[in-house]
Image (cartoon, rainbow, N blue to C red):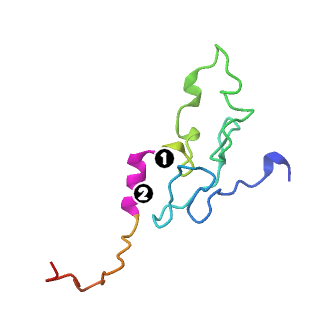
Amino acid sequence: MGKDNKKLEPLDIDGTMPHQISAPSFKGTGIKFQPPFKNEHGVIIGDSHYSSQNSPLENWSEDTDPAIMSGDEWVHPTNDIGWNTTENQEILEEKREPKAYPFMHPTIDVSKGQD
């Protein structure tokens, strides 16, 4: 299998991206990490390597139209810097089930009359 034909695997470990210091945890959110993908320009998106010999950024000239790098084909659904923002981290928190411990019962209010 050649270098360009290798299967692109997800980079997460149990819903986390430990190689990225500020990356959020997707664990418990129901969101599954997606593997990197190759876009129509031959650039691998979501592999955590931020340069590519096929990227317009690596081959920029005054004739390059910046619009070439717009659109969904340049954004990875789970390995994208946008997940590091406070707003997107809040979205992940809202998707997590409450931890409900140490003193919670699923059907009985155990704190009733305690305050």
Q: Secondary structure at mark 1?
A: helix
Q: Residues within 10 Å of mark 2 (few under 14, many from 20)?
A: some
Query: Mark on residue 84?
Result: 1
Q: Position of residue 52 (x, y in %)?
A: 72, 35
Q: Which amino acid is tagged 1? A: Asn
Query: Mark on residue 115?
Result: none
Taking the image as shown, residue 37 lies to the left or right of residue 21, namely right
Q: Residue at x 68, y 31 (%)?
A: 55
Q: Position of residue 107 (x, y in %)?
A: 26, 85
Q: Residue at x 62, y 59 (%)?
A: 12
Taking the image as shown, residue 36 lies to the left or right of residue 106, namely right
Q: Residue at x 67, y 16 (%)?
A: 61
In the rendered structure, which disc, 2 or 1, sits on the residue that comes first in sequence?
Answer: 1
Q: Nearer the viewer, residue 59 or 67?
A: 59
Q: Position of residue 42 (x, y in %)?
A: 71, 38
Taking the image as shown, residue 83 lies to the left or right of residue 17, namely left
